[in-house]
Structure formats: C-alpha cells, structure tokens
Image (spheres, helix red, strand yellow):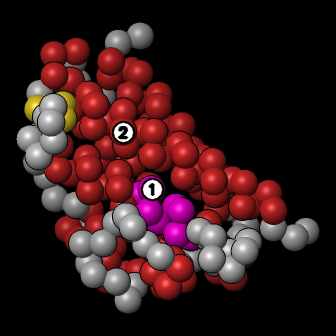
Amino acid sequence: MNVADLLTESFGRVAAGVPAVLEGLDETQLGLRVDGEANSIAWLVWHLTRVQDHHVADAFGGDQIWTSEGWAERFGLDLPVEDTGYGHGPAEVAAVRASAQLLAGYHAAVAERTLSLVGGLVDDDLDRVVDERWDPPVTLGVRLVSVIDDDTKHLGQAELVRGLLPG
C-alpha cells in the first residue's frame, strides 16, 4: 500500500459512512438534538463535509465545491457562505436543516474531488507546506490527517445520534 492508497482508503471509508448514516432519515430525524443543544446528524454531516471541502480546496489551491458548484445556494442556510461550522453554538447548529438527499449529494461531490486529488499523491507530496499561519507550518500530510481525524470523529458522533433515534 502506498500513500495514495492509504488516503484513498481513509477518505473512502468516510464517503461510504455518510450515506449510510443518512439513509432513510427525514429532516425531523436529521435535525434531532438529543439534549436540545447537542449537534444534530444534519449539522454533523454538513460540518464534516464543509471542513473537508474547505481544507482540501485550500491545500490543493482550488475552489470550494460549496460555492463553485452552487451547494451554498441549494442549502439556503441562514449562515455566512464561508461558514464551516467551527465554533457554532446552539443557534447556529439549529440553523443547519437539510434533507438526507442534499447532505449526501454535497458530501458525494466533495468526496469525489478529494479522492481524485489524493489518488495521485506520492510520499514527497506530503511534505509540501500548505499553511504557514502555524508554528510549525502545516504540511499537506498533516492537513490531510487532520481532515480524516475530524471527519471520522463527526461521522462517529452522527452514528451515535442515529442509534439514539426512537424506533
């Protein structure tokens, strides 16, 4: 297994998990917050996808699919277009309402682009600095691991919330 295979496998697992956690749920179920302030499945999936979209676009010097392919307009959220969910409180979490089809579609578009980009990487690519705002500067490898870590944590949270749904 090489680095491209490893990253493809990692992002591919998230890409398979997202539609599975959404399958068969309506907007009410997707918006359920188990304690009234917790993150909903809709917010968790939207957020993990927004972070992946934002970070991968930035790391590879491309546009975010959220804006370049019209997903921001399709979602129509009452949030700033550049918002990824970082630092959201209860009111912002509640503002993220969407159908399973919309959430799955956006994630599929982001996953397709991500898999295409990581599928061609070689070991030396991972050492390229992609963010100099940190000390030490962030390399592509560190950024991609960070995205995978964030994605898998939030997907696991969404799976937990789904398991708590009645019925």
Q: Position of residue 139 (x, y in %)?
A: 18, 31
Q: Is residue 100 visible?
A: no
CA neighbours of label 2 inside 10 A, class few (<14), some (14 to 19), many (20+): few
CA neighbours of label 1 inside 10 A, class few (<14), some (14 to 19), many (20+): many
Residue at 20 percent across and 51 percent down: it is 57
Judge whether 23 appears above or below 90 on screen.
above
Check the image and name the residue furthest to the top. Answer: 1
**Disc 1 to disc 2, C-alpha distance:** 11 Å
The answer to whether residue 13 is left or right of residue 56 is: right
Between label 1 and label 2, give the one nearer the viewer: 2
Q: Nearer the viewer, residue 93 or 61?
A: 93
Magenta highlight: main SS? helix
In which image quadrant can residue 161 be found?
Answer: bottom right
Residue designated by label 1? 48
Residue designated by label 2? 146
The stretch of residues the image draws in magenta is 42-49
Q: Position of residue 126 (x, y in %)?
A: 21, 24
Disc 1 element: helix
Q: Is residue 149 magenta?
A: no
Q: Position of residue 20 (x, y in %)?
A: 66, 52
Judge whether 20 appears above or below 120 on screen.
below
Residue at 63 percent across and 70 percent down: it is 38
Q: Is residue 40 visible?
A: yes
Judge whether 66 appears above or below 126 on screen.
below
Looking at marks 1 and 2 on the same chain, the residue that comes earlier in the sequence is marked by 1
In which image quadrant can residue 42 be found?
Answer: bottom right
Disc 2 element: helix
